[in-house]
């Protein structure tokens, strides 16, 4: 015997089924709550390491969580984009680790630079949020700014193009504010200072923070007959 439900009940049942189905689909597209950033672009030799896994080729669009590492080879570039649209351009022969602590609305995000350089363009952070650029020697605290962070042998350099950054030396606990147009230094002996940056230093920092385009290099040479020729090489920065 077939039982027929009232039409009003059929409609309610169908709406519940459709709602449940759409909810399942939405869950499938919901981003992983542990995701902090993504690999936005890679040029040449860029690898990633997550947890105890081996180094592998970084893939555009790949999610990054706390503890993930990014490494670039010679003439290589990686662009890392955070959920708040802050951009970090990992320059060649660099190694960094992404980390975070706290929860949304009260979160500290960190880029730990082990070697090399990174250009950054950090969006203005919410009142209780903070970005930190770190190394074994220093901590640079930022809430919204643009510039370049580099380290070599325990000596760190910070060039600020826009905004204001506080630079702290981990050894001496001394710190200095580095405003736009200035360059800060933090050394493994505890020394920390700042001075006005040169035009070339600011241009280099701005390039590190924004450049990911194809550039052209012109070379002149002579052919077998002694005639001058021009060779144009295009490369990524």
Image: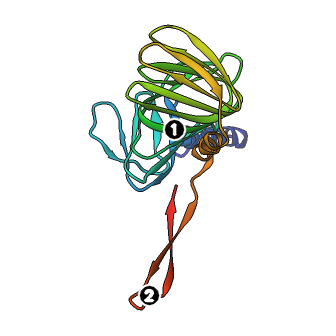
Which one is nearer the viewer's eye here, 61 or 25?
61
Mark positioned earlier in the residue sequence (2 or 1): 1
Question: In the image, is 105 to the left or to the right of 222?
Answer: right
- Residue 82 position within the rendered picture, expressed as x and y whole percent measured from the top left: 57, 36
- Tag 2's secondary structure? loop
Give the residue at mark 1: 118
Question: In the image, is 200 to the left or to the right of 152?
Answer: right
Q: Residue furthest top?
A: 173
Q: Compared with residue 176, is residue 36 higher up or lower down, i.e. above or below?
A: below
- Tag 1's secondary structure? strand
Question: In the image, is 35 to the left or to the right of 15?
Answer: left
- Please report the residue visible at 51 percent of the width from the left and 8 percent of the height from the top: 173
- Residue 193 position within the rendered picture, expressed as x and y whole percent measured from the top left: 58, 19
Which one is nearer the viewer's eye here, 15 or 135?
135
- Residue 157 position within the rendered picture, expressed as x and y whole percent measured from the top left: 52, 29
Q: Residue furthest bottom?
A: 225
Q: CA distance from mark 2 to mark 1?
A: 44 Å
Mark 2 Cα-neighbour bin, 10 Å: few <14, some 14–19, many ≥20: few
Which one is nearer the viewer's eye here, 175 or 224?
224
- Residue 130 position within the rendered picture, expressed as x and y whole percent measured from the top left: 62, 21
Specify the quadrant of the image occupied by residue 127. top right
Inspect this view and state whether residue 104 appears. no
Mark 1 Cα-neighbour bin, 10 Å: few <14, some 14–19, many ≥20: many
Please give the label number shown on residue 226: 2
- Please report the residue visible at 45 percent of the width from the left and 28 percent of the height from the top: 66
Colour scheme in use? rainbow
């Amino acid at each position: 015997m077939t039982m027929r439900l009232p039409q009003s009940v059929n409609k309610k049942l169908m709406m519940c089924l459709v709602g449940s189905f759409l909810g399942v689909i939405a869950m499938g597209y919901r981003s992983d709550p542990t995701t902090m950033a993504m690999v936005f672009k890679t040029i040449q030799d860029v690898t990633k390491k997550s947890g105890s896994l081996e180094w592998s080729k970084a893939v555009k669009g790949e999610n990054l969580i706390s503890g993930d590492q990014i490494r670039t080879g010679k003439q290589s570039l990686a662009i890392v984009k955070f959920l708040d649209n802050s951009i970090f351009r990992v320059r060649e022969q660099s190694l960094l680790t992404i980390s975070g602590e706290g929860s949304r609305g009260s979160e500290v995000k960190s880029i730990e630079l082990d070697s090399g350089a990174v250009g950054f363009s950090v969006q203005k952070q919410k009142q209780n949020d903070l970005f930190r650029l770190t190394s074994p020697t220093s901590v640079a605290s930022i809430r919204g700014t643009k510039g370049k962070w580099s380290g070599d042998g325990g000596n760190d350099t910070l060039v600020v193009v826009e905004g204001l950054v506080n630079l702290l030396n981990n050894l001496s606990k001394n710190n200095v504010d580095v405003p736009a147009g200035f360059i800060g230094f933090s050394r493994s002996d505890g020394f920390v200072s700042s001075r006005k940056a040169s035009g070339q230093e600011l241009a280099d920092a701005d390039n590190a923070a924004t450049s990911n385009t194809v550039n052209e290099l012109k070379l002149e040479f002579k052919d077998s007959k002694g005639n001058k020729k021009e060779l144009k090489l295009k490369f990524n920065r």
